[in-house]
Amino acid sequence: MLAELKGLNEECGLFGIWGHPDAAQVTYYGLHSLQHRGQEGTGMVLAQDGKLISSKGEGLVTEVFTEEKMQNLSGNAAIGHVRYTTAGGGGYENVQPLLFNFQSESMAMAHNGNIVNADQLKAQLEGQGSIFHSTSDTEVLAHLIRKGGFSELKQRITNGLSSLKGAYAYLIMTDSEMFVAMDPNGLRPLSLGMLGDAYVVASETCALDIVGAEFLRDIEPGELLVINDEGITSERFATCSQRSMCTMEYVYFSRPDSNIDGINVHTARKNLGKQLAVEKLIEADVVTGVPDSGNSAAIGYAEASGIPYEMGLLKNRYVGRTFIQPSQSLREQGVKMKLSPVRGVVEGKRVVMVDDSIVRGTTSKRIVRMLKEAGATEVHVLISSPPIKNPCFYGIDTSDKEELIAAKKSVEEIRELIGADSLTFLSVEGTVEAIGRQFEGENRGQCLACFNGKYPTEIFSDQEIDFIKS
Ligand code: SF4
């Protein structure tokens, strides 16, 4: 499904490099490959001759980093960020990396995820005199680091991290070193690679591939890496009580050419489609996927069911950003502009339409109608994940339960609403089985909270408390 139409959006992507003569250009390519994780703002901070230089703006990587701007950017280390706005709202001041110039030190910071106790920490820090420059939850860590009682920066970072609850992958850079931190549950993906002698860190392995870096390993839950001209060191600042990689990274967010914890995302999606065929076999003439993220599961379903896979829906790749707007009216117009049914494929056919998830249901309804108007005699909707019944508090934009159709309606009611001949969601057990992670425990190290309501961290924000009460 098309991210901007579905109402299920990733908060951001991170890229960092240490020890490369052309850090700016490499970061540009890395951020470009992570663009699907956030389109509202992007930035990079470069370490150059003992100084940190920031460049950022609202918009896509190609819009913010024009050829002219890139000519003026150089350095041998950089951290970069692409942002989709959830916590703290939009605006230039919230575009990351955030750069802090204190009297004694400068520090740049980029974050993926969501700090669930940010409001509480912010109130405490403001009470102690801290002045916040952005409304983003990311800045909380900078103030905690400044307030830390230890002199060594690494100790102050470790100390600051220990106060945070929620999901976070952090890149922190000074003019002499880079720190990489992962929350104790490992909720968001982050990988380490090498490009020549330079260390590279990225939210997805596709960014390592794009810049030509060799994948070394994924960052572990509760791990802190320190990278500088001497090399790299690793330590644990927290023990991992419950490894909880976001399941939706496999189902929907990550690029199909990325690997998460050793599992290729396209292969995981294909297996989800195969599992759908195990759980629900439909008598139909063609299988089609809702582009792009529904395609892999559709191929898997077709393979397992023996029903031919066809391109029944076409994505128009040349629609500008005018249609990528979070308002409901533009979202509705956006569906028509971005997807077209292929009449020659679906006319007179019983169609299986595979998509990765249903959030509000409005987009599925329009696509089903589109297929029927193009002559499909039946449209059976298969979803390669369980119903999303609970909001996400870890950096995915589904924090309003009111918007989640599966929180309010039964599967049959949703089927009726979207006008499908049948509707099937994958089971939670089938989802875990199909992705096939090799970790111990019932969840195999996956977060399933938006499906089953079992959140891997403590509850903190007012929003969460309201949700639990409801
Ligand atoms: S609640 Fe859902 S979307 Fe959020 S981190 Fe967990 S699996 Fe991912």
Image (cartoon, rainbow, N blue to C red):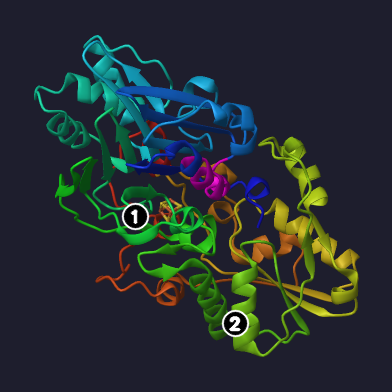
Q: Residue at x 54, y 50 (%)?
A: 33
- Residue kind at label 1, given as amino acid type: Met
Residue situated furthest left in the rendering: 150
- Residue kind at label 2, given as amino acid type: Lys
Magenta residues, dominant SS class:
helix
29 falls in the magenta region = yes
Which image quarter holds the C terminus?
top left
Residue 9 in view in this figure: no
In this view, the residue in front, 178 or 332, is: 178
Q: Residue at x 68, y 84 (%)?
A: 282
Query: Magenta region: which residues?
Result: 27-38
* Residue 194 disc label: 1
Q: Secondary structure at mark 2?
A: loop
The image shows a total of numbered marks equal to 2
Q: Which of the 4 quarters of the picture holds residue 383?
A: bottom right
Of pointers 2 and 1, the one earlier in the residue sequence: 1
355 falls in the magenta region = no
Which image quarter holds the N terminus?
bottom right
Mark 1 C-beta to ligand 1 under 8 Å: no
367 with respect to 208 (left or right): right
Q: Is residue 306 above or below residue 193?
A: below
Residue 388: x, y in percent?
A: 52, 57
Q: Residue at x 33, y 19 (%)?
A: 100
Q: Which residue is mark 2?
A: 280
Residue situated furthest bottom in the rendering: 306
Residue 161: x, y in percent?
A: 22, 36
